[in-house]
Amino acid sequence: MTNLTKSKHNVKIIILFVGVLLFPTLVFSSEQTLPSMIGSPFAVVALIIFILAYLAVMMEEYTALAKSKPVVFAAGIIWLLVAVAAHQHNVDPAALKSALNHNLVEYASLLLFLLVAMTYINVLIERNVFEALRCWLIKKGFSYYQMFWITGFIAFFLSPIADNLTTALLMGTVVVAVGNGSAKFISLSFINIVVASNAGGAFSPFGDITTLMVWQAGKAQFTDFFALFFPALVNFIVPAFIMSLALPNDKPESIDVTVKMKRGAVRAMLLFLLTIFSAVAAENFFHLPPYIGMLTGLSYLFLFTYYLNVTSQKRTDKPEFNIFSRVAKAEWDTLLFFYGVIFCVGGLAFLGYLSVASHYFYTGLGASAANIIAGLLSAVIDNIPVMFAILTMSPEMDTFQWLLVTLTAGVGGSLLSIGSAAGVALMGQSNAYTFITHLKWSWAIALGYICSIGVHFWLNG
């Protein structure tokens, strides 16, 4: 999974840079009245350092330098330059400290939330939940046509709970095992899984980092995202139907494989659902940040794994289940990468770069046009930095527009294979799925993109 994440963030380098310049929204409030410091030579150097850091991220696959390292370094240097520029412009040091604290709160909220979610997913993987599902699908003997739709719908409904990368990898292994070397079936199914995973994540705050960002920023309530269900479904169904007409008519041989889930797997799934409910309840009923509910849910898992160990039939000095080993397996490189992104973008926002971009796009073009363009950018840049930049700009938009940009940024990455973690991950699983094979069907995916926006305007506008 590390190599797949590396490939994804090769694209993110350009994406985040463009996102910073074009869509500033998450890190710093647009209400700041500080003087623009873009003309300062320190501001120019800060921008250059940011670009160089992302070039290093892009080269991660070739240099073996983890993506978090250059951006964390760049974040520190950029804020030193910000401090010098602020002193030159007689900016109150309290404003500088306030901006840093704002970025810290944003990052801490995201870090704690994602850490719990990653831990639960790692526990479910260790308990063989996903492997059991994969093996069950393989041995059922479905036709290519049936498997195409089954894997697509599972991806669509699984990604709102698990992330799109995990969902794509799981369904991809099923497709490769069932495909028996049928390049056409594998390539079409992979494209379908990418579209379905990204679309499914758009209507749930837990389905994608971008939806989580919008929810935690208070731009939409938890239940508001469900209004995107039908637009997201259309985004998946339209290209899936078109591609299904090109599927081979063969039926692969069934493979007799069985994997059983480990003890406590079902209860771990139920605890995950209870944890999600806790996060929603903390936000909606007690007006607490969602990470409070998530961390409370992590304690459920801590107590449950203690129960598994004390009731284990083995009862050796080594416990059956070490929960902290699952915590340690969280993608720390990715989590620290988010720190670098947030503080780099926050520094550039403080200097004034993002307010200029926000004025051009959201004031000049209008919210609808800017939000649709954001989705197209996410196919090239990746949706996380795009959404992060938009939240940093924090343009004045109603819930409908925030849901629109959540939809477009979430599903826009499906237009190209490099536009999302799901697409990059599957390119590494089979030679049958490449950038070109995906590009051949981008017209159908674009049709679904347009239709989903139309449905959103029709139902929610």
Image (spheres, grey):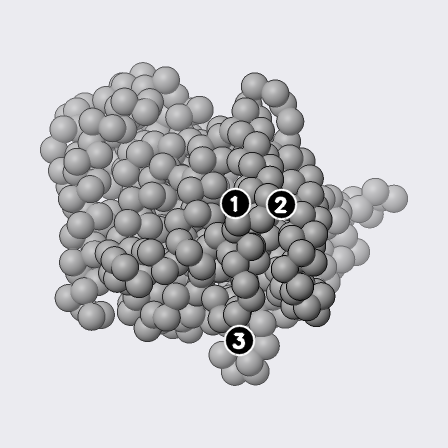
Q: Who is closer to the viewer here, 173 or 450? A: 450
Quadrant of image for the C terminus:
bottom left
Q: Secondary structure at mark 3?
A: helix
x and y, in percent, of residue 389 in the image? 46, 53
Q: Amino acid at mark 2?
A: Phe
CB atoms of marks 1 and 3 within 8 Å: no
User: Residue at horizontal 65%, vertical 53%?
Assistant: 85
Is residue 232 depicted above or below 214 in this figure? above
| Residue shown at 38% from the left, 32% from the top | 418
Residue lying at 35% horizontally and 65% vertically, measured from the top left: 402
- Amino acid type at mark 1: Val
Q: Which residue is mark 1?
A: 129
From the top left corner, tell me how far across and down residue 146 is, in percent.
23, 37
Q: Is residue 437 above or below residue 50?
A: above
Note whether 312 is above or below 188 in the view shown. below
* Residue 283 numbered mark, or none: 3
Q: Choose mark 1 or mark 3, whichever is in front.
A: 3
Residue 255 left/right relative to 82: left
Q: Is residue 263 visible in the rendered structure shown here?
A: no
Between discs 1 and 2, the one toward the N terminus: 2
Mark 2 highlights which residue?
42
Q: Is residue 289 above or below residue 310?
A: below
User: Dot 2: few (<14), some (14–19), or many (≥20) neighbours within 10 Å?
Assistant: many
Q: Is residue 60 left or right of residue 407?
A: right
Distance, label 1 to label 2, CA atoms, is 52 Å
Q: Nearer the viewer, mark 1 or mark 2?
A: 2
